[in-house]
C-alpha cells in the first residue's frame, strides 16, 4: 500500500520538435498523445501505463512536476491526512486534470518541488504484451530504454545559514511517505551534514534522490537499461546523434549503478542507468559516504571531483 514507483515527470522544453526527436530517436520512447496546449506525452517500451514523460513547451528548461503512482485510490486519502497532519498543505486535483489520469494529490515537498500522487493512469500495455512475451520488441529505437527509473532533485543546502532542505525533505519522505533511506552522503567537519540521500519505496536502490546545492531544481531523470553492454551502446547512440554527454559510461559508488549523464536539447540532464547492484531489502543497513570519499561515491573509478556535475542543473 502507498507509493509504488515513479509515475511520470513533466519537463519544460524550449524546442518541442528537438525534444521529441531526442526522447524518441536517442532514448527510444514513443509519443502516445499530444494535447491542445501542445504538451507531448511519451512512454518507454516496457511501461504499461499511457505515459511517463510529459514535455511542456516553455521558454525555460526544468521540471514542472514529478508524480508517483500509489497502489490504491484510498491511499490518496490516507496520505492526504498524513501530509496535512505533518503541516504541509495539499490539494486533491480532480480526475482529468491530466489526460488519461485519475485524481491527483498535489503538494510541495519541503524542498519546494511540486509533487503529485495518483492511483490511476490509462493502461495501454507494453510493446511485448503479457502473453508469451519476447524479452524485447522488434521496433526498438536508439538506446531503447526500458522505463523511467528515478529522478534526482536538487535541494537548497546552505549550512552557514542553517538551511538544509536535503535533510528536511528526506525526513518528510521517510516519516510521511514511507520511503526507506538507502544511502546518504554526510559532509562537514564531523560528517554531520546530510548533503545527499537516496530513497526507495521498492527493493531497487532508489526511486528518488535528493542532493544539496545552491538552489532547488532538477538534477536528472534516469531511464533504465538492462546491463552494462546496453549502457555502452547507449553512449554510441548518443555520439551518433551528437548528444551533449556530461559523464561518459562509468559506475557510481552510490547504488553501484552503471551510468551515462547527458543533456536533452533544452539542457535538462538525463541519465541511462543500469544495474541492480543490490536489493534494498527493508532491513538493509543504510550506506553512508563521508565527505572525504563522496566523489568516490559519485564517480567510483576516479573518485575525483567534477564540480560541473553538481553545479549545473535546470
Ligand atoms: C545517481 C544514481 C550525484 C549522484 C548521483 C547518483 C548527483 O544519479 O542514480 O545513483 O551526486
Ligand atoms: Fe541517477
Image: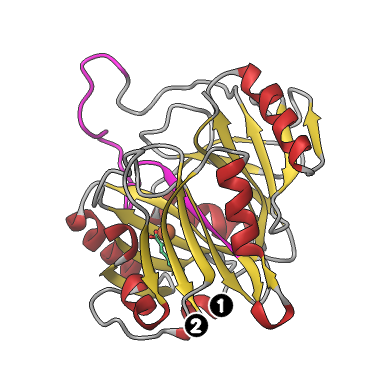
Tell me the SS state at disc 1.
loop
Q: Quick check: can you spot residue 83?
A: yes
Q: Quadrant of residue 33?
A: top right
Tell me which colouring the rendered structure shows: secondary structure
**Would residue 172 be found to the left or right of residue 161 on screen?**
left
Verify whether residue 151 appears in magenta. Answer: yes
Q: Which mark is residue 168?
A: none
Residue 248, horizontal then vertical, whole percent: 31, 73
**Would residue 198 be found to the left or right of residue 75 on screen?**
left
Most distant residue in the front direction? 190
Verify whether residue 58 appears in magenta. Answer: no
| 295 and 53: which is toward the camera | 295
Most distant residue in the top direction? 131
| Location of mark 1 (residue) | 312
| 204 and 102: which is toward the camera | 204
Residue for point 69% across, 54% down: 113
Q: Which quadrant contains ligand 1?
A: bottom left
Q: Which mark is residue 308?
A: 2
Q: Are marks 1 and 2 in contact (CB under 8 Å)?
A: yes
Residue 297, horizontal then vertical, whole percent: 34, 71
Query: Residues under labels 1 and 2: Cα distance?
Result: 5 Å
Residue for point 32% across, 47% down: 144
The crowding category of the residue bearing disc 2, from other C-alpha atoms within 10 Å (few below 14, some 14 to 19, many at least 20), is: few
- In which quadrant is the C terminus drawn? bottom right
Q: Which residues are magenta?
A: 130-154
Please state the total of marks drawn on the protein image: 2
* Above or below 291: residue 276: above
**Would residue 220 be found to the left or right of residue 157 on screen?**
left
Q: Quick check: can you spot residue 9?
A: no
| 275 and 148: which is toward the camera | 275
Tell me the SS state at disc 2.
helix
Amino acid at each position: 500500500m502507498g507509493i509504488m514507483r515513479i509515475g511520470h515527470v513533466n519537463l519544460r522544453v524550449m524546442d518541442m520538435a528537438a525534444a521529441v526527436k531526442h526522447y524518441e530517436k536517442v532514448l527510444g520512447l514513443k509519443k502516445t498523445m499530444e494535447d491542445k496546449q501542445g504538451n507531448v506525452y511519451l512512454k518507454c517500451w516496457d511501461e504499461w501505463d499511457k505515459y511517463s514523460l510529459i514535455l511542456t513547451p516553455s521558454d525555460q528548461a526544468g521540471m514542472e512536476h514529478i508524480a508517483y503512482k500509489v497502489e490504491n485510490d484510498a491511499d490518496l486519502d490516507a496520505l492526504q491526512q498524513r501530509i496535512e497532519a505533518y503541516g504541509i498543505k495539499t490539494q486533491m486535483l480532480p480526475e482529468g486534470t491530466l489526460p488519461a489520469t485519475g485524481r491527483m494529490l498535489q503538494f510541495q515537498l519541503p524542498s519546494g518541488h511540486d509533487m503529485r500522487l495518483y492511483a490511476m493512469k490509462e493502461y495501454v500495455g507494453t510493446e511485448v504484451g503479457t502473453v508469451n512475451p519476447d524479452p524485447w520488441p522488434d521496433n526498438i529505437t536508439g538506446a531503447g530504454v526500458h522505463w523511467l527509473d528515478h529522478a534526482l532533485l536538487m535541494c537548497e543546502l546552505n549550512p552557514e545559514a542553517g538551511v538544509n532542505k536535503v535533510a528536511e525533505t528526506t525526513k518528510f519522505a521517510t516519516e510521511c511517505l514511507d520511503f526507506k533511506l538507502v544511502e546518504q552522503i554526510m559532509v562537514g567537519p564531523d560528517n554531520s551534514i546530510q548533503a545527499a540521500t537516496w530513497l526507495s519505496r521498492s527493493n531497487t536502490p532508489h526511486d528518488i534522490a535528493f542532493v544539496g546545492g545552491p538552489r532547488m531544481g532538477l538534477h536528472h531523470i534516469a531511464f533504465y537499461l538492462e546491463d552494462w553492454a546496453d549502457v555502452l551502446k547507449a553512449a554510441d547512440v548518443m555520439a551518433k546523434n551528437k548528444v551533449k554527454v556530461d559523464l561518459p559510461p562509468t559506475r557510481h559508488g552510490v547504488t553501484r549503478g552503471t551510468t551515462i549523464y547527458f543533456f536533452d536539447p533544452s539542457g535538462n540532464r538525463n541519465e541511462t542507468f543500469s544495474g541492480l547492484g543490490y536489493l534494498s531489502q527493508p532491513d538493509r543497513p543504510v550506506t553512508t559516504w563521508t565527505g572525504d570519499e563522496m566523489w568516490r561515491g559519485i564517480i567510483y573509478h576516479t573518485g575525483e571531483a567534477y564540480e560541473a556535475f553538481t553545479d549545473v542543473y535546470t
